[in-house]
Image: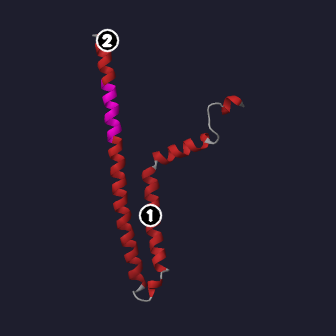
Amino acid sequence: MMGILQGQVAGSGIWRPAGRWFLNNIELVLTAVGIGVILLSGFVASRSAFKDSVPLTRTVEMATAVSATLVGVIHGILFWLLRRRQRQVRREAIGQIREMLGRVDLMLG
């Protein structure tokens, strides 16, 4: 029993795989959340108090279009930031590998 718990914070065994899964699938999670926001905005617009002043279909269309545009812009910015970070990490890893290979070359040469 002690061997199982040794070196672990309570509950960390559960949260690490969940966090890893989230980070590995962040694009899918953000897309699902975005679709949910778009659908929810249409639902809220259909229940809004503005039904009397504007035809219902126009209100739902407008709310859905605006929220879809905003979700698209936010997704674009987030995905660009994620890719930028991935490129930065990849460049750093390549630099470290080149540095290690340079040291090995000096040792062997």
Asked if residue 95 is positioned above or below residue 62 in the image, the reply reads: above
Front-lying residue, 15 or 64: 15
Please report the residue visible at 38 percent of the width from the left and 77 percent of the height from the top: 61
The residue that label 2 is drawn on is 107
What's drawn in magenta, residue-wise?
Answer: 87-98
- Please tell me how crowded label 2 is: few (under 14), some (14-19), or many (20+) other residues with Cα within 10 Å: few
The residue that label 1 is drawn on is 35
Amino acid marked by disc 2: Met
Please indicate whether residue 64 sits to the left or right of residue 7 in the image: left
- Where the N terminus falls, by quadrant? top right
Pointer 2 or 1: first along the chain = 1
Amino acid marked by disc 1: Ile
Residue 91 magenta: yes
The image quarter in which residue 96 lies: top left
Please report the residue visible at 31 percent of the width from the left and 35 percent of the height from the top: 91
Please indicate whether residue 73 sits to the left or right of residue 33 in the image: left
Q: Position of residue 34 (x, y in %)?
A: 43, 62
Callout 2–callout 1 Cβ contact below 8 Å? no
Query: Callout 1: helix, strand or loop?
Result: helix
Whole-number angstrom distance, CA of label 2 to CA of label 1:
56 Å
Residue sitting at the far bottom: 52
Please indicate whether residue 37 sits to the left or right of residue 105 in the image: right
Q: Position of residue 53 (x, y in %)?
A: 41, 88
- Where the C terminus falls, by quadrant? top left
Please report the residue visible at 42 percent of the width from the left and 52 percent of the height from the top: 27
